[in-house]
Image (tube, grey):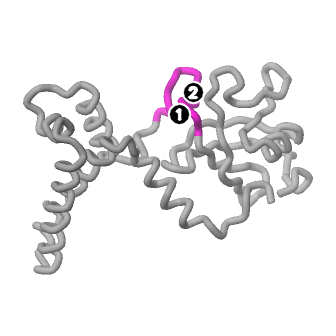
């Protein structure tokens, strides 16, 4: 990918760069790159921009520590906008939020459920079934995952779609609890699957 090949006539010689989380596909922010920012991004593997207000080069995270590690880059059909997929070190917006855009969680209700399970793990409220699982530990949680997986398979073999949906819900819930116990997030799983899928994709900027 060569900066000279970009169509920069629309934005005064600057290239708009849309930043997207490589794991969740959530759009994080929009910035602008000139040649120096683009080449610095390619050479260092973390995103840099050209600040139009300060009229200077800046690397996202140089103050906060929340750098954006580049995974891939894609140019749009007109050659005038860049999509950069990244793995962020932390919140991207200056407000302390994940994204500068207040969009719904890309992971939907499963993401909400994972967040609730995480809060149960941190607070361990009395009387909560999830709390009881965390107190008993990985062995008990893992046993429940196996039991729910077997029940889901039985319903699938029997061709009972409604019961399969029900048992799969139980399976996913217990798997999320086990993931929390192991300090593994949905984003970690998505990243692993994406890495397997993209093994043959050339590195960014090539």
Label 1 CA crowd tier, 10 Å (few <14, some 14–19, many 20+): some
Which residue occupies the foreground of this view, 187 or 77? Answer: 187
The residue labelled by disc 2 is 93
Query: Which quadrant does the C terminus fall into?
Result: bottom right
- Whether residue 11 is visible here, answered yes or no, is no
Please tell me the numbered disc located at residue 99: 1
Query: Which quadrant does the N terminus fall into?
Result: bottom right
Distance Cα–Cα, label 2 vs label 1: 5 Å
Q: Is residue 160 left or right of residue 52?
A: left
Which residue occupies the foreground of this view, 16 or 111? Answer: 111
Q: Position of residue 130 (x, y in %)?
A: 17, 39
Label 2 CA crowd tier, 10 Å (few <14, some 14–19, many 20+): some
Please tell me the numbered disc located at residue 156: none
- Whether residue 162 is visible here, answered yes or no, is yes
Q: How many marks?
A: 2
Q: Is residue 194 left or right of residue 54?
A: left
Q: Give the structural element (helix, strand or loop) at label 2.
A: loop
């Amino acid at each position: 990918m060569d900066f000279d090949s970009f169509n920069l006539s629309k934005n005064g010689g600057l290239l708009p760069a849309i930043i997207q989380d490589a794991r969740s596909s959530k759009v994080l922010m929009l910035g602008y790159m000139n040649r120096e920012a683009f080449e610095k991004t390619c050479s260092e593997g973390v995103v840099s921009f050209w600040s139009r207000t300060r009229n200077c080069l800046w690397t996202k995270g140089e103050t906060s520590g929340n750098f954006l590690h580049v995974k891939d880059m894609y140019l749009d059909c007109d050659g005038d906008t860049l999509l950069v997929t990244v793995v962020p070190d932390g919140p991207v917006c200056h407000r302390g939020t994940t994204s500068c855009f207040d969009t719904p969680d890309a992971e939907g209700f499963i993401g909400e459920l994972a967040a609730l399970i995480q809060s149960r793990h941190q607070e361990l409220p009395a009387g909560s079934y999830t709390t009881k699982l965390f107190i008993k530990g990985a062995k008990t949680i893992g046993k429940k995952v196996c039991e729910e997986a077997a029940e889901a398979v039985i319903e699938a073999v029997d061709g009972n779609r409604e019961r399969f949906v029900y048992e799969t819900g139980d399976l996913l819930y217990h798997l999320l609890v086990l993931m929390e116990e192991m300090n593994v997030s949905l984003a970690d799983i998505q990243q692993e699957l994406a890495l397997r899928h993209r093994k043959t994709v050339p590195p960014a900027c090539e």
